[in-house]
Amino acid sequence: MSDIEIIRRAVELNEQAAFTELMNRYREPVRLFLIRFVQNLDDAEDLTNLSFEKAFRNLPNFKPEKAFTTWLFTIAKHTAFDFNKRRTLPTQSMQLHSSDPNKVREFPILDQEPNPEQNLILNQKHAEIRALVSDLKPDFKLAIELFYFEELSIEEIAEKTNKPAGTVKANLSRARQVIHQKLSGKRPQ
C-alpha cells in the first residue's frame, strides 16, 4: 500500500494501524538520520519519537503532491536543529537589583551565536562529507546531491534523471554504504 493511501486512512479514518504502518516503515531511517545530527543514540531515539509525534499531529497538513519521506525527514531535521540549539547554547545571566540590597534576581539569557570552535567543527564536518561525496561514482554522487543537498524526493530525482525510482534508491543506498565505509575507515567493497 502506498504512503498516500496509508496517510488517507490515518487522517480520514483516524486509523491507528495506519499510523503504526507509517512508523514501522520509516522509524529506522529517521533514527539513523538523527544519529548523524546529534551523535548520541539515546538522544536520537528520543528525537525519533518526537519527530513522529510532530508528524502525526501535523499529518492533516501534509500535501500529497510532495513526497512523504521528504516531509517527514524535514520534520526530523528541524527537531534535531532545535535540540542541538538548546543543547549547545551557553547562557549568561543578567542581574536585576531591587530596592532591597540583599535581593538580587537573575535571569538567564541565551547566547544565540555558536562559538568559534562549534563553527570550525561544523565546517570541517561539512567539508569532509562534501569531499567524500565528490569522490563518488557519478550516479551515486548525483543521487546524494539531489536527495540531501537539494532535498528532492526519490520520485523527483527519478523524474529529473530519467531513471526508475528503484535505481535511484539503490544508488542512494550504495552511496551511503561507500560514505559510511570511508568514514569508518573500512575499505569500500
Image: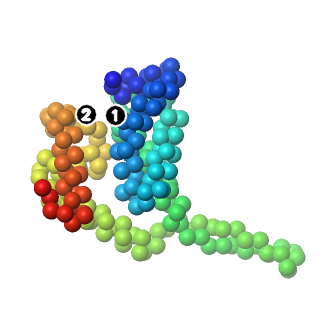
- What kind of element bears circle 2? helix
- Left or right position of 28 against 45: left
- What kind of element bears circle 1? loop
Q: Which residue, as the protein is rendered here, is positioned at the far bottom?
A: 101
Q: Residue at x 73, y 74 (%)?
A: 95
What residue is pinned by disc 2? 155
- Left or right position of 9 against 130: right
Looking at the picture, how far across and down is residue 23, in whole percent? 43, 36
Question: How far is the residue under mark 2 from the one under mark 1?
Answer: 8 Å
Q: Give the quadrant of residue 129.
A: bottom left
**Of residues 77 and 109, the one drawn nearer to the viewer in this rendering:** 77
**Of residues 140 and 40, the one drawn nearer to the viewer in this rendering:** 40
Q: Residue at x 49, y 45 (%)?
A: 49
- Tell me, yes or no, if residue 170 can be seen here: yes
- Left or right position of 100 against 4: right
Q: Residue at x 50, y 19 (%)?
A: 13
What residue is pinned by disc 1? 67
Number of dots carrying numbers? 2
Query: Contact (CB < 8 A) between labels 2 and 1?
Result: yes
Residue type beneath disc 2: Glu
Looking at the picture, how far across and down is residue 90, in whole percent? 55, 70
**Of residues 131 and 182, the one drawn nearer to the viewer in this rendering:** 182
Q: Give the quadrant of residue 109.
A: bottom right
Q: Quick one: label 2, few (<14), some, or many (20+) residues within 10 Å? A: some
Looking at the picture, how far across and down is residue 20, in whole percent? 45, 32
Give the colour scheme shown: rainbow
Looking at the picture, how far across and down is residue 142, in whole percent? 18, 48
